[in-house]
Image (spheres, coloured by chain):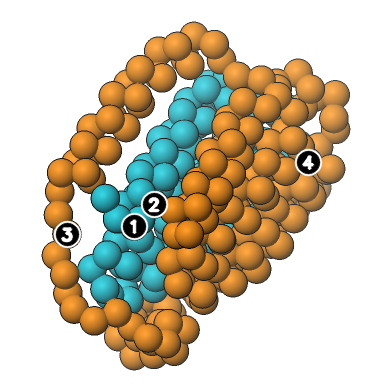
Chain colours: A orange, B cyan
Amino acid sequence: MEWLIFALLASWAVVSAMGVLFLKNPVHAILSFISLILAVAGMFLHMRAELLAGLQLIIYAVAIVVFYVLVITTIPWEKVKRFEGFYKREFLLGFPVLLVSFILFAYAIMKGSFANLGSQARDNVKEVGKSLFTTYLFPLEVASVILLTAMIGAILLGRKEE
Amino acid sequence: MTIEKAYLLISIFLFLSGVLGVIIRKNLITLLISTELMLNGVNLALVSVDRIVGGIEGQVFALFILAVAASEVAVGLGLIVALFRLRGYEGSSEITHLRD
């Protein structure tokens, strides 16, 4: 049963990633990206990371994809049509290198062994929240400052020049 | 071969296909989507390693990666809109000068 769920989610994710890579139209690429996000959220649920699955759905599938769709509707479409598709020569040069590195990574994962630190956390959301607000409080504050800075920067970049 | 190691393989596949997308795509928006693909692969790797070693820290780091991805998308799309409005650029092969 575990492997059945894994096979379903993995094939779904692989097909969606291929769609993001090779679909010509940018809108189709974004729709394929939403499908990939749903598959990754299912993988998080399968590995019992419920908080991260919910945040994945909220942040990626709602906020980020809406940004993309908004920008695509802002830009005139004839200009976008000029640059769809992908470079053939770069693909033929880059693909063997990435295939070899994938084989190396896969070999390292298969042969390597991980340390076992002990017990699994039972209540996942509670544990993550607790360590987020005690041990990792300073990085959380830094992340909030980064979000504020990005918001101000996006407003400044996107405003009309007089 | 446990199921977490299989998920690690999927995460490596996602990361490398994101790298390939950054190399080969022409449109600037699809280039940014490929970056998001890489970030998703890293998140998946963090969560599965977390599951293997029995910790909680990987999920916290994945949460920070989510926040940074949101801000990166905001700034990147702002840059794309500004580039398009000021210069009329829409393809990755056109940005070859930093000034003029």
Do labels 2 and 1 touch, CB within 8 Å? yes
In x, y percent, where is residue A130?
39, 90
- Classify mark 3: residues with Cα within 10 Å, few (<14), some (14-19) or many (20+): few
Q: Which mark is residue B4?
A: 1
Marks 2 and 1 share the same chain: yes
- Report whether A76 appears left or right of A158: right
Q: Which mark is residue A72?
A: 4
Instruction: Report the chain holding disc 3.
Output: A
SS assignment at label 4: helix
- The CA distance from mark 2 to mark 4 is 33 Å
In x, y percent, where is residue B38?
46, 45
Which badge, 4 or 3, comes first in the chain's sequence? 4
- The CA distance from mark 4 to mark 1 is 37 Å
Do labels 2 and 4 touch, CB within 8 Å? no
Residue B80, picture quadrant: top right
Q: Which mark is residue B15?
A: none
- The CA distance from mark 4 to mark 3 is 44 Å
SS assignment at label 1: helix
- The CA distance from mark 3 to mark 1 is 11 Å
According to the picture, the residue beneath numbered tag 2 turns out to be B7
Nearest to the observer: residue A109 or residue A72: A109
